[in-house]
Image (tube, rainbow, N blue to C red):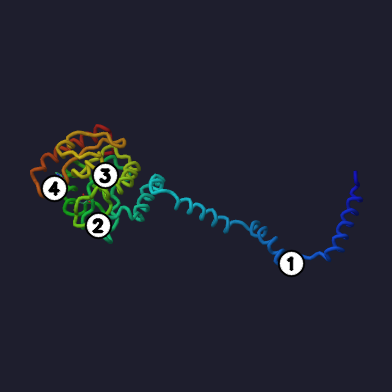
Amino acid sequence: MNSSKDLYSEIAQFLENEREVYGPFSMAETEINADTEPSVSAAKPTGETIKTVVEEENKEYRSMTTREKIEACSTLDELHELCEKAEELRTDLKGTNLVFGVGNPQADLMLIGEAPGAEEDRQGEPFVGAAGQLLNKILAAVNFNREDVYIANILKHRPPGNRNPNPDERSRSLPYLFRQIDLIQPKIILCLGLISGNTLLNREDLLRDLRGGFHPFRGADLTVTYHPAALLRNPQWKRPTWEDVQKVRKRYDELGCKP
Ligand code: URA
Ligand code: URA
């Protein structure tokens, strides 16, 4: 085995030979920089590192499907923000405002209408026009405050001329509404009108076949009654509506829902 002294002289001899053949050792400026720069920035960490992590996460988020983004919302605020950016929630009426939903995020009773009208679009809140005034009275008649329940619609944007939401608009909107329902976890859902009931239950029934009973739906008891706008045109439907909301009140109390 060589002693370290032998090793040293061997290396010295090797370097001497190299120098004779290739000339004196030197490094180009660029080589020095290339060698030192990465280690300098690696030693000086945070700002750059954090930026890289955030960029990676943004890239990951952008590559998620819409469904995955919806499912990733863990609060109503996050879902609200996602809905603000969602072009697919729009109808072919330009420049409308998002009407996300209103009320108590922990509500045991959730009301679901059809789509925003002109006044709802203006204010960004569901059921604030004439139908909304009547809805408030119907709720008050069975001792519910508007603030205690949660109110949303099948569509979150106003359709042109208040026409019925078409099947395509409904199916683009439903994943967002389902997430909204799952985040609120109501015990009872009251659908206002035939469109809302048939859309959620995925049926094409008549209102008389939908109302009167409760249907299991995403962990809630779902029932359907007349749309308040329909009551404004057809006062004879007020009595059956009154019966429906009394049933809702009764079920609400039986289930021990919040007062
Ligand atoms: N009609 C609805 O279905 N929803 C509203 O928000 C207003 C009127
Ligand atoms: N038909 C509807 O479309 N809605 C109602 O509320 C009642 C009848």
The dot on residue 121 is 2
The residue that appears at 69% across and 64% down in the rendered structure is: 33
Left or right placement of residue 84 versus residue 33 in this view: left
**Is the residue marked 2 within 8 Å of ligand 1, measured from its CB?**
no
| Rendered image quadrant of residue 243 | top left
**Nearest to viewer (mark 3 / mark 2):** 2
- Could you tell me which residue is drawn at 25 percent across and 39 percent down? 202
Q: Please tell me how crowded label 3 is: few (under 14), some (14-19), or many (20+) other residues with Cα within 10 Å.
A: some
Front position among marks 1 and 4: 1
Q: Is mark 4 within 8 Å of ligand 2?
A: yes
Amino acid identity at mark 1:
Ala
Where is mark 4, residue-wise? 230
**Residue 204 in the image, given as x and y percentages of width and height:** 20, 40
* Mark 4, secondary structure of its residue: helix
- The residue that disc 3 covers is 149
Question: Is 54 on the left-hand or right-hand side of 130?
Answer: right
